[in-house]
Amino acid sequence: MKQRRFMVVSGIVGMVMAVLPAAGAQAAGLPCPTGITATMTKVNDFWIAHNTNPKGANWPIGAYFAGDLAAARSLPNPRYSTYAANWAAAQKFALLGGPTNTFADAQAAGQTYIELYQADPKHPASDIAQINQSVTSMIHSTKVTDWSWIDALFMSMPNFAKLGVIENNTAYFDKMFAEFHSTKSVRGLWNATKGLWWRDGTFVGQNTYWSRGNGWVIAAMARVLDVLPATDPHRAEYVQTLQQMAAALKAAQQPNGFWYVNLGNPADHPGPETSGTAFFTYGISWGIANGVLDPAIYQPVVTKAWNAMAGVSVQPSGALGFVQGVGSSPSSSQPVTASSTAAYGVGAFLLAGTELGKFCH
């Protein structure tokens, strides 16, 4: 295994617009910078205080730590990275079901293992051995039907991108695209006309576009593009997917700044929902910061979304409310209330704040 301990932030299709130098204008309406950082800190401190010893390596906790590590870097707050490192050590850097398990949900924790490995030279290669074995077993297989539901794109794709950089091996990127293409085009879960995704094959043809499911996808595009080399032949398609989704999401945003659980029909279980809103805020903000989305068009979208979450979702205690519970459709875990929370919602919120904070510098 090649010991390449760095993150590659590549260019966007040969051009990155000069977005960040104009941050002052773009940040209009955002509580920059102290309001964003204070709210992120309040939410994560509450979560950590009530989850002092998180158990297991399941997908909700894996998604949480993606946000926790992003917050650790951006605030910066070394206590958050220590929290992640202690959790990973307690799991022995293992996947649920072990290294032979290629189920996407089991791979979600691998993203944190990889980031911890890259950030600290003291981490041995054995810390990413299980996630690498799981991913490479997929690379060596002719099967390209592992991701039958769109949540899997977030859980699994970033591992392929990150490991491909570490190993300097394009086979990781090639297999990632083959699986992505299968989900998108062969299974037909992408509706190009709408610019949105059906959660799985049971929804194809219906006017049901689950908010968090689409949130997983746009967040996956951002996390993959953040490290994928500019030379990758499929990078442009990931960028285009993010752009098409952003346009559809702009149209689907509610006047109060939230996205409701059914992007196709906001009257279906209406009301604020934080996890989808946070992932959309993250993905669109990443697109603005990296020059693939026009800030004049999309900055108001993410500003309105962040202010809605900060004002409605974040409770006085720091608890993050209005997070739809585990499920697979708008009807899952209803009703969604101020007391509804979950690890992945906190992770999504921290990812959103991390990207938005870039507009304040």
Image: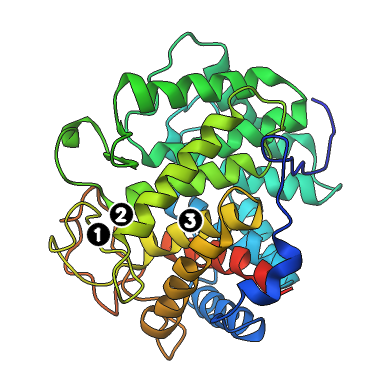
Per the model, the C-alpha gap separating discs 3 and 1 is 21 Å
Is tag 1's residue or tag 2's residue first in the polypeptide sequence?
Answer: 2
Q: Is residue 15 above or below residue 341?
A: above
- Tell me which corner region of the image, top left, top right, bottom left or bottom right, holds residue 261: bottom left
Residue type highlighted by circle 2: Ser
User: Looking at the image, which is closer to me, 101 or 170?
Assistant: 170
Instruction: Find numbered disc 2 in the image and state the secondary structure of the residue it sits on.
Output: helix
Residue type highlighted by circle 3: Ile
Residue type highlighted by circle 1: Val
**Which residue reaches farthest top?**
142
Q: Position of residue 332 (x, y in %)?
A: 19, 56
- Residue beneath label 2, please? 211
Horizontal arrangement in the rendering, residue 248 relative to residue 228 (left or right): left
Q: Looking at the rendered structure, which numbered label has been put on residue 61?
A: 3
Instruction: Find numbered disc 3 in the image and state the secondary structure of the residue it sits on.
Output: helix
Residue at screen point 32% across, 28% down: 148
**Which residue reaches farthest bottom?**
316
User: Looking at the image, which is closer to me, 331 or 300?
Assistant: 300
Q: Is residue 101 above or below residue 219?
A: above
Instruction: Find numbered disc 1 in the image and state the secondary structure of the residue it sits on.
Output: loop
Residue at screen point 47% across, 28% down: 101
Q: Position of residue 175 (x, y in %)?
A: 55, 19
Asked whether disc 1 touches disc 2, contact meaning CB atoms under 8 Å apart, the reply is yes
- Residue beneath label 1, please? 261
- Tell me which corner region of the image, top left, top right, bottom left or bottom right, holds residue 339: bottom left
- Tell me which corner region of the image, top left, top right, bottom left or bottom right, holds residue 217: top left
Residue at screen point 48% across, 44% down: 243
Please state, as top left, top right, bottom left or bottom right, where the C terminus lies in the image. bottom right
Per the model, the C-alpha gap separating discs 1 and 2 is 5 Å
Q: Position of residue 315 (x, y in %)?
A: 40, 86
